[in-house]
Every structure is written in C-alpha cells, then in structure tokens.
Image (spheres, rainbow, N blue to C red):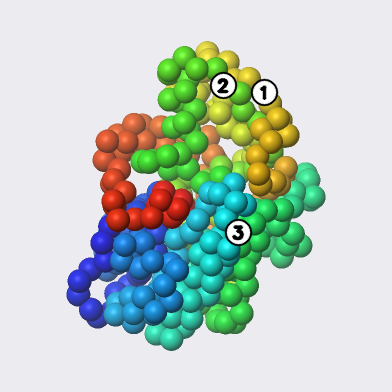
Amino acid sequence: MAASNESGSCDLLVTGALGQLGRTIMAQAKEQGLHAVGVDIDEMPLDDRSRIQEIVTKHQPRFVMHCGAITNVDGCEKEPLLAYRINGMATAWIAEASAAVDAGMAYVSTDFVFDGSLHGTPYPVDAKINPLSVYGASKRLGEEAVLAHGRDDFYVVRTSWVFGPGGKNFPRAIINRARSGQPLKVVTDQIGRPTMTHDLAEALLDIRRLQPAGGVYHAANEGQCSWHQFAVDTLAAAGLGDIEVGEQTAADLNLPAERPSWSVLDTDKLAKVRGKHLPEYRDALARHVPLDEAAQSETPAASPSATGQLRGKQY
C-alpha cells in the first residue's frame, strides 16, 4: 500500500501497512471515514531516520499507528543488531517524528517482553519486564522510547499471538497442513491469548478516538489456550475437527529463541476505556476462517524491491 503523493494533514498514518494488522487498520479507518495514509518499507524504510522524518512531516498526521516491525522471533535471534535497529531505534525515530508534528502515537508491542514466570495469573500492564529473546528485548527498547516522551497521547499496546485473514497466519498453516494429509504436532506447554487482527484494529482505532490516558495497554482476544489447543480449535472452526493433532513440547522444537511458557495478558485496563473486552478467541476464529479463505487470493504481493529480511514480518 503506497503512501499518498499528496502532502498535507491526515487523520492517521499507519506503518507496516502491508502487514496483516496494517491492512486491517487501513480498511477499518476507511470505513470510519478517516483520511488514513499507509506506508510500508518501500515508502518509509524503518532503518532510515531521515526518511521517517520526511514522511511524517509530509503527511502531518494527527495520529500514528506504528505496526511496522520484524516479528520473526528466531530471525531476530540470528540478527540481533537488525532487530534492535528496526524494533527499537526505528520506533524511537517514529516517536521523535510524531512528537515533532504534535501527533499522537500507538506502538504495537508484544507479550514477549515477559518471561512467563507469572504462570496462572494474567500479566497486568505494570508487571515486571524480563524478555527471554532478542525479539522481546528489541520490542521493549521500542516501548521505552515511546514512554520516555511522557506524552498523554502516546500509547504502548501489547498484544499476543496475532492472526488475521490474508497472507501467512497460524490457522492457515494448520488448515493447509491438515488438508494436505500431513501429520500435525503442536506445542502444548506455551499458553497465551490468540488475537485476531480485526478485533485488535478496532481496539487500536478506539484508542485513537477515545484518547485515554497515555501509557501501556494490553489488547488480546478473551480466553487462553496452548498452541495445541489453538490448532484443535482452528480445525473445528474449519470443519476438520476429526483430524488428530499430535502433541509436543517447546523443547522438542529446539528453536533458537526462547519463548515464555505463559504470556496471558490482563486486558481489563483497556476494557474499562472501551466499555468492553475483545471477543473470545474462538468467536474470532469462527469469523477468521471464512474471511481468510476469501482473502488468500486477494493478499497484496510483496514488492520485488523490498528486502527479504523485512517483508512479511509485520504484525
């Protein structure tokens, strides 16, 4: 999604606009009658501070929704300097540019800033931070950069296990594998809250509209599950509930980056602002499956000029 060629003020500037969350925010903003400009790495490379300043200054947004990131957890472990530059420093530059034009900002962050030690209790927004991975640490660096401005219209919005129609997503991978007859084995010892992009986008746009006190908020669908249970629920939603899903542990996968075994987010603070929680994740799955079937053929192709390291790793 290209940025508008016209200069002048806009209601909303969305980074990572080709990502699954960015696309959804842009669509919902249009439905709400907002003048929204979407940029991705072709228009605003996140490793280019001057370009970030140029784009934000050009469009003079009233609010910036920063969804652009490297979210490949194991990739970040292998390329830590890139992760810190994109997830941390670029966020600082976007916050700097937003403040310079007096724009509000919401930065989409992650449950991976936590270590899982609060097992059994949903993580409140002020819980102790202790990321286990480079990805989590790089996103925390971005959080600190946003919060350091102390602005009442700057927000850190942590979410978890994001999925949505179009492109790569966990439910799609499970359904495709099941339909191809390949065996399924999914992790049982990591518990979190799946979050559908449609519901998350609505919550983010509500923050822009309602303008609550600045700071940290958690946004995720209600309910909690393991990745294994999420896979089971996905197949049920797709009418494939008779297919068996095998079990494995996180240790069995031996992945480069450590994940928190428990990352359930306490979403009550945001629910008080909005007057409601996000829907239960099984409700979200039931809506997601038919939307994703339709969206697969409509998802924008990656630009051939985009770098392989960044493309496809937005929220």
Which numbered circle lies on residue 95? none
Q: Is residue 138 visible?
A: yes
Q: Nearer the viewer, residue 215 or 248?
A: 248
Q: Is residue 55 left or right of residue 243?
A: left
In the image, farthest residue toward the left: 6
Between marks 3 and 2, how big is the CA–CA gap? 31 Å
Q: Are marks 1 and 3 in contact (CB under 8 Å)?
A: no
Q: Is residue 211 visible?
A: no
Residue visible at 60% across and 59% down? 80
Between marks 1 and 3, how big is the CA–CA gap? 31 Å
Q: Is residue 88 left or right of residue 168?
A: right
Q: Position of residue 85 (x, y in %)?
A: 53, 67
Which numbered circle lies on residue 80? 3
Residue visible at 34% across and 79% down? 54
Between marks 2 and 1, how big is the CA–CA gap? 8 Å
Q: Secondary structure at mark 3?
A: helix
Residue, disc 1: 247
Residue, disc 2: 184
Q: Position of residue 127 (x, y in %)?
A: 74, 61
Q: Is residue 294 left or right of residue 175?
A: left
Residue visible at 65% across and 39% down? 255
Q: Amino acid at mark 2?
A: Leu
Specify which label sits upstream in the sequence, 2 or 1.
2
